[in-house]
Amino acid sequence: MKPSTDVLVVGAGPVGLLTALGLARAGLRVEIVERGSGIGDSPRAMTYLWFVLDGLAELGVLDDVERESLLSLDGLTLRVLRTGEVVEWGKVSLEEITGRPYNNVHLGQDRLGTIALRHLERHDGVTVHWDTRVTGLTQTDDRVRVATEGPDGSTELTAGWVVGADGAGSTVREAVGLGFDGMTWPERFVATNLRYPFDDHGFNDANMVVDPMYGAVVAKIDDRGLWRVTYAEDLDLPVESVLDRMPAVLRSVLPGSEDYELVHHSPYRMHQRAADTFRAGRVLLAGDAAHATNPTGGLGLISGLLDLYVLWPALAAVVRGEASDSVLDRWAADRRRTFLEIASPMASNFKQLVYHTDPARLEEALAGPRSVAGDPEKVKAAALGMAQLRSPQLVPEPA
């Protein structure tokens, strides 16, 4: 007897939904289990660099993303809070390489998830179970049995494969007994969406405010005055009183008037961690369930997108009998190596620069960015160098 579905995806964030979309477009039966009642709207990732856009195009969602996003050419901008220095890489087009008149896309991950869900609804072979949590998981040579608890009580779902895309606290990862080694930073991040005229003060679309006490990432969300400001605070401070402390922090970061409108905020802990392996039998881990990084530089969701761009064609080929499941081992090993050797160190370096640079070492830390600023060829080379985060496809894309 066949399993009830080809692939069960746990987690309805962008990584889970886009993985499901790729599989559905390849003709597979897909079920999605999500513990929430809908797509979460708390401030999280929102910047997508040029080298992840082809994957969105292949999934058929890029046109919608372009219509709903802020499209940007801006490169890295560092603003040293204590001295007022601005290290600006400027606008350098990559259109001759990418075919697009912009380099980056700014779009809240909840809106990306909404777009993905809209596309999924066009496929008959897709079922989404909201308000449903995984309570257990067992697997045999030919299937995975997943126990769930949802609106209709306890249910068991069977699938040929399971993709755990259920975040850093992954129930799927715990169910298969995988560790999540690494470290937790001694601060929490506080992501805020607020309305404020940063444009009037010369801010570019994406800015890193460098300061050992009031470091922050400031990024434009849309053309209607909405911006993301993400700062760090000591993890020992009570999370319940974040809002009480927020005005003092923002007073130090905002470049002019303190008259801002707070639209949304979300405090969260930061990690640099990776699962022991991204494959355990018929269970695969992607996105934050596989690896977690602090978000400075936007490499968290970007890494998750790059996971799924290679995973869904490989998994579809395996299910359809067109490839050996050894391709999934290759996928798992390469994505784990890329995270540990490239993405995690890069994100950690960004965080240390923005939030914790020792004033005595600030000149040393700024030397590299300063050497690139104002030189279009160096800026282009730096932007193109970020593509090392990608992994090669392992199978031809399914027809």
Image: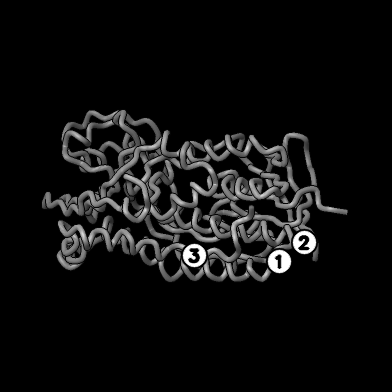
Q: Which residue is mark 1?
A: 281
User: What colouring method underlies this structural image?
Assistant: one colour
| Badge 3 density bin: few <14, some 14–19, many ≥20, Cα 10 Å | some
Q: Nearer the viewer, mark 2 or mark 3?
A: 3
Residue at screen point 43% across, 63% down: 389
Left or right: 356 in relation to 283: left
Q: Which residue is mark 3?
A: 391
Tag 1 or tag 2, which sits nearer the N-term? 2
**As rendered, which of 95 and 283 lies closer to the eye?**
95
Q: Which numbered disc flags the more N-terminal residue, 1 or 3? A: 1
The answer to whether any part of residue 236 appears in the image is no
Residue linked to disc 2:
139
| Picture quadrant of residue 190 | top left
Q: Are marks 2 and 1 in contact (CB under 8 Å)?
A: yes
Mark number for residue 264? Answer: none
Q: Quadrant of residue 89?
A: bottom left
The foreground one among 96 and 149 is 96
Q: Which of these two is toward me, 43 or 4?
A: 4
Distance of mark 2 from mark 1, alpha carbons?
Answer: 8 Å
The numbered mark, 2 or 3, whose residue comes first in the sequence reads 2
Asked where in the image residue 253 lies, by quadrant, the reply is: top left
Question: Residue 171: image x %, image y %?
Answer: 64, 54
